[in-house]
Image (cartoon, rainbow, N blue to C red):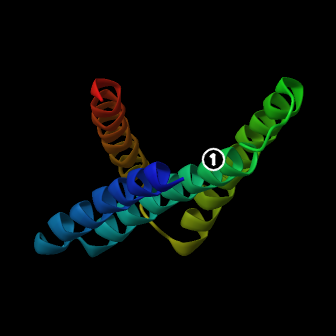
Amino acid sequence: MNDYMALCRYQLSAGVILLLVFAVSGKYLTGFSCLFGSVLMASGSWELARRLASSSVSVGADDLQGSLYRGAALRFVLILAGLAVAFLLGLDLPAVAGGMFAAQVLFYFASLKMYRDDAKH
């Protein structure tokens, strides 16, 4: 689970970096929207990590598959609810999507590096 928590921190750092970049240029709403998007992606990653950690106990393949499908559905609903909250808060939805994208790109490259380094050992 610690690997996933490190990856969640990378996702959150993407939002913080975007927030700082937009805050320097005076676009605070865009910065907070990007941060919100990265928090949304990090919460989905945290939920996946929690689900994988709880299912690491010896369970059958069917139980594990069902758990992962339920988790995917839960993360989908989480994203939809998060986008609805962002809309109700008046955040910039394209910027929220940009924060989500930046968080996922950073997640991809960080996990690629992390697991490549693990494969070398």
Crowding around mark 1 (Cα neighbors within 10 Å: few <14, some 14 to 19, many 20+) is some
Nearer to me, 90 or 99: 99
Along the horizontal axis of the image, is 77 left or right of 104? right
Image quarter of residue 8: bottom left
Along the horizontal axis of the image, is 84 left or right of 115? right
Residue 93 in sight in this render? no
The residue drawn where x is 61% and y is 60% is 82
Residue 75, horizontal then vertical, whole percent:
67, 47
Along the horizontal axis of the image, is 17 left or right of 76? left
The residue drawn where x is 29% and y is 56% is 14
Give the residue type that dot 1 points to: Leu
Image quarter of residue 59: top right
Along the horizontal axis of the image, is 5 left or right of 65? left
Relative to 1, does residue 15 appear above or below in the rendering?
below
Relative to 33, does residue 60 appear above or below in the rendering?
above
Residue 115, horizontal then vertical, whole percent:
36, 32
The residue drawn where x is 11% and y is 69% is 25
Residue 86, horizontal then vertical, whole percent:
54, 65
**Quadrant of the frame with the C terminus:** top left
Nearer to me, 101 or 110: 110
Point out the residue furthest to the front here: 121
Residue 51 in sight in this render? yes
Residue 33, horizontal then vertical, whole percent:
39, 64
Nearer to me, 3 or 85: 3
Q: Which residue is mark 1?
A: 48
The residue drawn where x is 59% and y is 52% is 44
